[in-house]
Image (tube, rainbow, N blue to C red):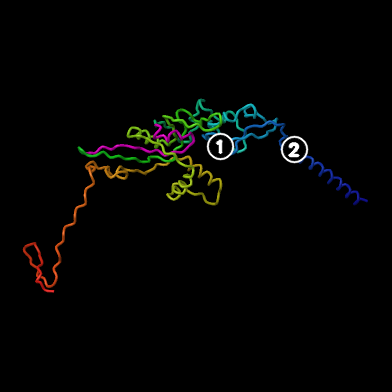
Amino acid sequence: MLMAGALAFALLCATLARSLFGGGGSSAASAATPAPSNGTEVLVATRTLPVGTIVTADAFRYQPWPDNLIDKAYFLKGKEDQQTLLGTVVRYPITAGQPVTQGAIVKPGDRGFLAAALGQGMRAVTFVVTAQNGVAGFVFPGDRVDLLLTQTVAGSTAGATALKASETIVSNLRVLATDQRTDKTTDSDGKTVVATFSNVTIEATPKIAERIAVAQQIGTLSLALRPIADDKMELERQIANGDINVPTGGDSRAEKQMLLQLAARPVDADSFTTGAEVSRFQRGSYSGNQQAPATPAPASPSPVQPPRPRGPVVTVMRGQSVTQASLGGM
């Protein structure tokens, strides 16, 4: 009877413990799971947005959110137009799936907008372009461009022909604004409007900013739009040169950080073209004593060689003159 009572008591304790812990786990799970929403949707980030990211249409989306967790700083569907956020800049880091708050982004015209758009250690530089050297208005904020300098170098001597030269001084520059606009202008159908501009603001390192300032005084600056496919080629080139260290161990986060670092860093270029590579009437060096020929110089005729003697010959030496005379034999 004593053993039967102990067994019954043990079964009762086990049943009570199971009921207690099972009910507690269900309560905790129900508390951790957000209550189903009744249709309220908030704007969340579709990917990780670091500081300085220019917002595009694929950066955000609306997602149902529990009513008891909605904050006044969130962007609610039906109350805020998502199109008004295009062209804004991320002020604080936003992780993927995190609701976007009004304080996390800066709109064009707000105080500190351009400073928020700049990456760490970068500077904003503005220079003048025309429709011809500005890719006819097909450059928009967020695009990547190369910067070309075209100049005329005078000869060091009187009458020397000037040297015409063009060189790519910087590559992979990010465009921040065109004519004080930081977003793309669209029409009523949602299509991008191409408009000419006279000023371009780009992001550069302090050293590259100095080079651009000097280049504006030397000659004419032109833009060359870079395709997106160049990012892979640039990555392979910098890895080969040792500019970027490839992370070991197959860490995907480290590789992604490396790609972001590559995409955001401008590169000093050393490609150049002189006038002689375009036209043979132009100079091809920086020396000032070369002049372009008025007409191509004709090739000098080769001297007529005397017929070689046949048969026995006699060599006659008169001072430094040496001649051969044939004896007429076969």
Expressed as whole percent of the image width and height from the top left, the position of residue 36 reads 73, 34
In the drawing, does residue 118 fall left or right of residue 19?
left
Q: Residues within 10 Å of mark 1 (few under 14, many from 20)?
A: many
Residue 167 is drawn in which quadrant? top left
The C terminus lies in quadrant: bottom left
Camera-nearest residue between 93 and 192: 192
* Magenta span: 130-156
Camera-nearest residue between 113 and 60: 60
Please identify the residue farthest to the left as the structure is shown. Answer: 318
Expressed as whole percent of the image width and height from the top left, the position of residue 107 reads 53, 28
In the drawing, does residue 106 fall left or right of residue 21?
left
Question: Residue 49 bears which disc, if any?
Answer: 1
Residue 77 is drawn in which quadrant? top right
Q: CA distance from mark 2 to mark 1?
A: 31 Å
Expressed as whole percent of the image width and height from the top left, the position of residue 86 reads 55, 31
Expressed as whole percent of the image width and height from the top left, the position of residue 230 reads 46, 44
Q: Amino acid at mark 1?
A: Leu
**The stretch drawn in magenta includes residue 231:** no
Dot 2 or dot 1, earlier in sequence = 2
Residue 67 is drawn in which quadrant? top right
Residue at 37% of width from left, 44% of height from top?
271
Residue at the disc numbered 2: 30
Position of 41 relative to 309 (above/below)? above
